Amino acid sequence: MSILGTRVIRTEDPRLLTSGGVYVDDLREPDLAGAVRATFVRSTVAHALITGIDTSAALAAPGVVAVLTAADMTDLPAPPPPEPLPDDAPPPEGPNPMGGVWQEPLLAVDRVRFVGEPVAIVLTDTTYAGEDVAELVSVDYEPLPAVPSIEAALADESLLFPDAGTNVCVRGGRAIGDDSIFAGCEVIVEGDVVNQRVAALPMEGRATAAVFSGGKLTVWTSTQNAQLARLIFTAVGLPPDAIRVVAPDVGGGFGAKIGVDREQIIVAWAAKRTGKPVRWVETRNENLMGMTQGRAQLHHIKIGGDRQGHIKAYRLDVVQDSGAYSRMGGFLPMLTNLMAPGVYDIPVVEADYKVVVTNGTPIAAYRGAGRPEAAATVERAVDWFAAEAGVDPAVVRKLNFIKKEQFPFVTKTGAPYDTGDYEAALDLVLDAAGYDQLRAEQKRRRDAGETKLLGIGLATYVEITAADGAAGETAKVEVHDDGTATVYTGSSAHGQGHHTAFAMIVQNELGIPMDKIEVIHGDTDLIPDGVGTYASRSLQLGGSAVHKAAIEVKEEAAKKAAELFEAAEADVVLDADTGTWHIAGDPDKSLSWSQVAAAADQGLIVANVRFTADRPTFPFGTQLSLVEVDAETGKVTLLRHVTADDAGPVLNPVLMEGQRHGGIAQGAAQALVEEILYDADGNPLTATLMDYGAITAAELPSFELLTHETSTSANPLGVKGIGEAGTIGATPAVHNAVIDAVSHLGVRHIDMPTTPERVWTAIQKAGAQKESAQ
Amino acid sequence: MIPPSFTYARATSVDEALALAAEHGEDAKYLAGGQSLLPLMKLRFAAPTVLIDLGRVTELSYVRDEGTYVAIGALTRHHDVATSELLLADIPLLAHTAEAVGDPQIRHRGTIGGSVAHADAAADLPASLLALDATFVVRGESGTRTAAAAEFFKGIFETALEPGELLTEIQVPKPASPSAWSFQKFNKRAIDFAMVGAAVQGAGGQNTAVALINMGSTPLRATAVESALANGASIADAAALAAEGTNAGSDIHASKAYREHLARVLVRRALEEASARA
Amino acid sequence: MKVELTVNGKGVTADVEDRTLLVHFLRDVADLTATNIGCDTTSCGACTVLLDGESVKSCTVLAAQADGRAVTTLEGLAAESGEMHPVQRAFHEEHGLQCGYCTPGMVMAIVSLLKENPSPTEAEVRTGLEGNICRCTGYHNIVKAALAAAEASQ
């Protein structure tokens, strides 16, 4: 009886629920005893030259241990001086340049480019002295004209990197042609769709503790991949084998903790520089200014088709705001372009992108990383098109889906979809939601002139997971002579429950009970090679690696058991239900794992593997959002959310549902309440949780999750990635629902987040347009 | 995140609190529940060098039936105001307003007197107290005085309290028709301060009080609405005047024009609800 | 100044700066690190503990204000025998936590909520948790856990 596919509650929980997780700020490692506290001095202006830094008052303050600026970083290898780009050089093609003229410093050198950029680091003997001393560091700024938006960046008047000659740092995709692709289209919709900047907002911000002793740097850091972090920490001037990185319990990441940021490098450097252990834990205010953020794309779309609802052509023009420094923001729109047509078989698709720097927080991966933007916009475009054509949006979707028989299917943008059944997922959701009854009730309220209107929003999405399948994931499985097993994984859980999932895989293969299996991750001394947890890759790559290692352990053990039984290897069999070895047909003679391992070299059976996949996978689904819009105020209430998210066979429904729930909430939040805002001078307006509208339980309903499983052949488990699907599907579902609620009033589009004022304003505008049209 | 340094002083009685305030002068601030003051200090927007903790002044925590009015000690917590049987029966508007403040954790610490003295224009209780024509009892070095709610709120975070004075009691007259109440708090998220709010006590017609949250630098009575109702106007017609005499601001949450629109809608809904409850 | 609290039934006394927040007293003086800090504006509830049995945000209480009073943190919730409190058990059974960072505050908030309202509706649970932010779970299973704990305690 396989444990896979059954509901198993988490082995991680008892500790977390009774003594609490141990996050960086909780660590009481002996090496960190007496650690000094780091506090950063950050820029208070968005764009300025630094004309002076006066640390004298800070250095004289009680509790101060050190005050360091870029000028003190003399022991670090300096980046090569950038060659200014020729005046007429076009912006570079393809993903992000990250260096050269776009170089991001560690501590700001002579210029700041966003409010919150680190300028100095203060070390104090106590936490409480930190802010006191940091306040005493005096920085002189000569302000430069701010570039607070994509529009300002494109104007290329104030340049963040003068040596680059432009604010456009990357360009790519296919050249956009002329409008002939829309010739003959009876219905054409053209417009701008904003995918607004949001905060990743893990509940634990960034945190790092470092100690340099005996030539070795040890860093504990809140990261999604300790191995990548270690590579990044070599920037302090040490080789990887002189660095150990440990990821303790990590309080959420959502993509913003891939590797580490400049602050963590500075902290590690400070530990090396001063010879003292250093601990840094950012405040939420710092986090909302300094941690990388998500989305921030401006889309211009054009979609055309016939009156029956067939879509003939779709054009997507993306401008990515990468914030002050390009980083991963330069790479994300490539994924947006790749996934532009979504689940649809559209004859002509054009997609291109450019990336601009602005005086804002740098953009990087955030749950979905480039793909939610594609789905949000194509789903918006399809609904908009359907409204113009006067065809039900569910009908338009079905008309244009890639059909089940067409898989594997390569899209016009080059995405190789493996498997899918979009129509089945849609039908499942429509049925469970009672779509026809919902439309009937919507109509009833409209006809009765009620002011509490119903909106029904659909999103059918597909996304790419494990795009870096070639990098794969590592796993080592050991069975010990006491019958227990240890799994070392390159995956790096920060809430996903890998310890439970991977133990399930080992129990399933080897019959060793879960309570005898320990799973370890996140320590480069124990796991020097690993890729990490992001891009919904961990089960399909990390889990497959564990699976592969378990099988190799089984094969090794079979050889040993055969020796002990004095039988042929082919006659030896493992009973995975009881975890015992037998000779086939002779159940009386058995060996335990303990006995088999004891007989092995050093009392250990071990397999150390890397699993790679030769292609990415494409989970998909349909989400339906039911909202109520108060037409008098524009306020939106989420009533129901029904989803069928298909990521292949479900290994543990408990974990899978949890991932979907979390993704739906974040997706709904972007549609409804969350937005990072700056004023005209680039000052952040939403840098605390009072002002940034993080969604709470009071705004959300319970969700209705349906099961749909379409496996893939990309890995032996047959699974795709579920981690980001919820976010990708929920945003357009909720967004479309809000607009659907007031579409009968003539509203065709409202930008996210659909705040009450935005909705109300759209209703007023549509009403005024109707009046003037009469 | 960390407040600047200060000296902590503790009072166990009103007299002691006043004496400590006199001793420390302008440098000192009273600390009641701390749910408004401590956040400001943690962001370093406020930096008093002395905090006088009133948490042990238990003599100021009570809800008392005084016949024609209810007397509430200034240090009565929101939770206790919200769950007071007396208030739920005789002044439900006030009990339900207290229930709307913040979240359960904040209501376990925050006090009615603290909220009134802090005078955030977006706060809930000042508006309802204004609608209920509450009287505030204030004690200072020179003795005790009272101030009507209508004269108490001067501006954003500004009240009629003189330095060192302590709000000790809030006296709320029992409304003629207690069940004719409504409290409309409009926000994007349940935890947010009111973008705009309306508190109504009365079933329309004469003697109906309407107060607005966040339509100016202080809570405001919607006097144009009240006059119209007193003169026999319908709820709809009266509510249409809700924005008159107001001075709403524009910020990241709402524009002035939208706030004015909300005021009209919320006042109408509040009047309808109070009327239906009567 | 000297501050004396009872934390999880044990007396803790220390000389601390007057401005010490209760959350730091618990984490750094009493060495109970389960209670976490998630924000700086009293918004997120990660720091929720019980003060004399009622939920409070310990980042917005001075240790001095809690002087002489009793605090309960997550670490003090399970029975002496080690048996989990119904709310802890419900979180485990209903998968009410993922990364675990908001969890101590969430659990304590629910313990207090159920004390005041032993049979809440789903809506009452959701409104009751408006001061507790979670980023991982979407709240669905947290709400289920609260309702399950309520039922188990009947």
Image (cartoon, coloured by chain):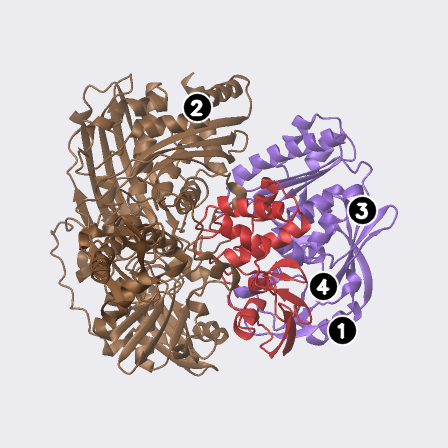
The amino acid at mark 1 is: Ala
Residue B162, label in figure: 4
Q: What letter labels the chain drawn in brown?
A: A
Q: Is residue A583 above or below residue A594?
A: above
Task: Name the residue beneath numbered marker 1.
Answer: B19
Does residue A701 appear to the left or right of A651 in the view shown?
right
Q: Chain of mark 3?
A: B
Give the percent coordinates (x, y) of residue A465: 26, 45
* Foreground disc of the pair 3, 4: 3
- Give the labeled residue for mark 3: B86
Can you say whether A727 is above or below A100 in the image? Answer: above
Image quarter where the N terminus of chain A lies is top left
Residue at which label 2 appears: A435
Q: Of callouts 1 and 4, which one flags the residue occurring earlier in the amino acid sequence? A: 1
Residue drawn where x is 20% and y is 24% of the image: A182
What is the quadrant of residue A478 in the picture?
bottom left
